[in-house]
Amino acid sequence: MAIPFLIGRIIFGSYWLMAGFNHFAQLEPMSGYAKAKGTPSPKLAVAGSGHSSGAGRAQRAPLVCIQLSELFSLIHFSAGASFPMHDFWNATDAQAKQADKINFMKNMALVEALLMLLQLPHPWPVSIRVDVAKH
């Protein structure tokens, strides 16, 4: 089961890397969306969330065992951002409602996967153990 788990980690980690990259590549439109949702300092919020979801966490996902604090950080980010940014229950436009619902449900599925990862014993199979306290 180690190889399927490793493949899943690579795919899952790739999602977080691409999501983080997208926050920087699409900084202007995402900042406009965040501003429309009432986010204070929208550019800073989008850039910060890009770092949190991408480069700041997932570059280690494929081979290095993610620390529990990193999993909790991703859970906090995903759950915390979903309710104000993808509040489909408040949308009046049908297209916006559908887009927000899809993104909200995707984020909840990510939170679910992260919660399941918390249940796995550490270090994970096929992992390089890195003590982040020493680095």
Image (cartoon, rainbow, N blue to C red):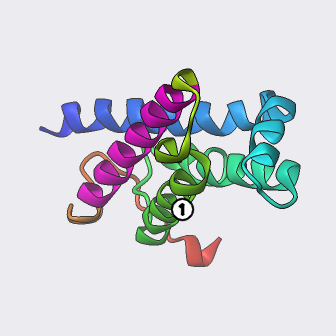
* Position of 60 relative to 130 (above/below): above
* Position of 58 relative to 135 (above/below): above
Instruction: Assess whether residue 97 is covered by the magenta stretch.
Output: yes
Residue visible at 40% across and 53% down? 128
Specify the principal SS of the magenta part: helix
Q: Position of residue 117 (x, y in %)?
A: 28, 56
Q: Position of residue 73 (x, y in %)?
A: 52, 65
Residue visible at 60% across and 76% down? 134
Q: Nearer the viewer, residue 127 or 111?
A: 111
* Position of 130 relative to 36 (above/below): below
Helix, strand or loop status at disc 1:
helix
Q: Residue furthest left?
A: 1
Quarter of the picture containing the C terminus is bottom right
Q: Quadrant of residue 1?
A: top left
In the rendered structure, which segment of residues is drawn in magenta? 96-117
Q: Which residue is mark 1?
A: 80
Q: Residue furthest top?
A: 95
Q: Quadrant of residue 115?
A: bottom left
Q: Few, some or many C-alpha atoms within 10 Å of disc 1 (few <14, some 14-19, many ≥20)?
A: few
Instruction: Assess whether residue 40 is covered by the magenta stretch.
Output: no
Q: Nearer the viewer, residue 6 or 16?
A: 16
Q: Residue furthest front?
A: 92
